[in-house]
C-alpha cells in the first residue's frame, strides 16, 4: 500500500506542467530506481533530469544522457547518440 501512495504522490509532482511533460525514466525492467535519494526523469524530447524521493524536480531535464546518482553525483553528458 505504501508503494501506491508514494507512486501517486510522485505522479502528482512529476506530470504535465504547461508545455512541459515529465515522466520517470524507463530502464529495461521498468521505471528507474531511487538511488541516493534521486531518480531520473525524461521530458518529451528524451532529455534527462532528476527528481528527489518526493517527486520535486531538482535538476530539470536538460541532458542527452545521465547515469543514476551515486555519492551525491551523477555523470551526465549532452554528447552522443542513442542506439
Image (cartoon, rainbow, N blue to C red):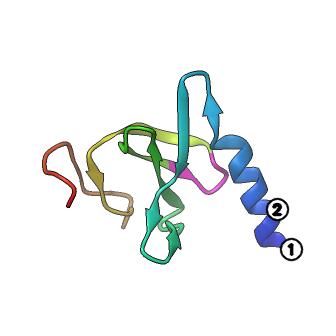
Q: In this rendering, would 27 be left or right of 75?
A: right
Q: How many marks?
A: 2
Q: Look at the image and say whether residue 53 sits in the magenta stretch.
A: yes
Question: What residue range appears in magenta?
Answer: 51-55
Residue at left offset 38%, top offset 63%: 68
Q: In this rendering, would 15 be left or right of 25?
A: right
Q: Quadrant of the C terminus?
A: bottom left
Q: Where does the image place residue 24, in percent across and percent down from the top left?
A: 54, 55
Q: Is residue 51 above or below residue 34?
A: above
Q: Is residue 59 above or below residue 36?
A: above
Q: In this rendering, would 10 be left or right of 42?
A: right
Q: Nearer the viewer, residue 26 or 41?
A: 26
Residue at left offset 47%, top offset 57%: 25
Mark 2 sits on what residue? 5
Q: Secondary structure at mark 2?
A: helix
Q: Please identify the residue farthest to the right as the structure is shown.
A: 1
Secondary structure of the magenta portion, mostly?
A: loop
Q: Look at the image and say whether residue 78 sits in the magenta stretch.
A: no
Which class describes the residues within 10 Å of circle 2: few (<14), some (14-19), or many (20+)? few
Q: Where does the image place residue 17, in percent across and percent down from the top left?
A: 62, 28
Mark 1 sits on what residue? 1
Q: Where does the image place residue 39, in percent across and percent down from the top left?
A: 50, 58
Residue at left offset 27%, top offset 52%: 65
Q: Please identify the residue farthest to the top as the structure is shown.
A: 18
Q: Where does the image place residue 73, in percent across and percent down from the top left?
A: 33, 57
Question: Answer yes or no: do the residues labelled 2 and 1 have beta carbons within 8 Å?
Answer: yes
Residue at left offset 31%, top offset 57%: 74
Q: Please identify the residue farthest to the front as the structure is shown.
A: 83
Which class describes the residues within 10 Å of circle 1: few (<14), some (14-19), or many (20+)? few
Q: Quadrant of residue 1?
A: bottom right
Q: Is residue 2 above or below residue 18?
A: below
Amino acid at each position: 500500500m505504501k508503494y501506491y501512495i508514494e507512486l501517486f504522490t510522485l505522479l502528482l509532482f512529476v506530470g504535465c506542467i504547461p508545455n512541459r511533460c515529465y515522466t520517470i525514466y524507463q530502464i529495461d525492467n521498468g521505471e528507474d530506481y531511487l538511488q541516493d535519494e534521486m531518480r531520473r526523469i525524461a521530458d518529451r524530447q528524451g532529455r534527462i533530469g532528476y527528481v528527489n524521493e518526493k517527486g520535486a524536480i531538482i535538476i530539470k531535464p536538460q541532458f542527452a544522457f545521465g547515469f543514476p546518482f551515486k555519492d551525491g553525483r551523477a555523470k551526465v553528458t549532452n554528447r552522443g547518440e542513442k542506439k
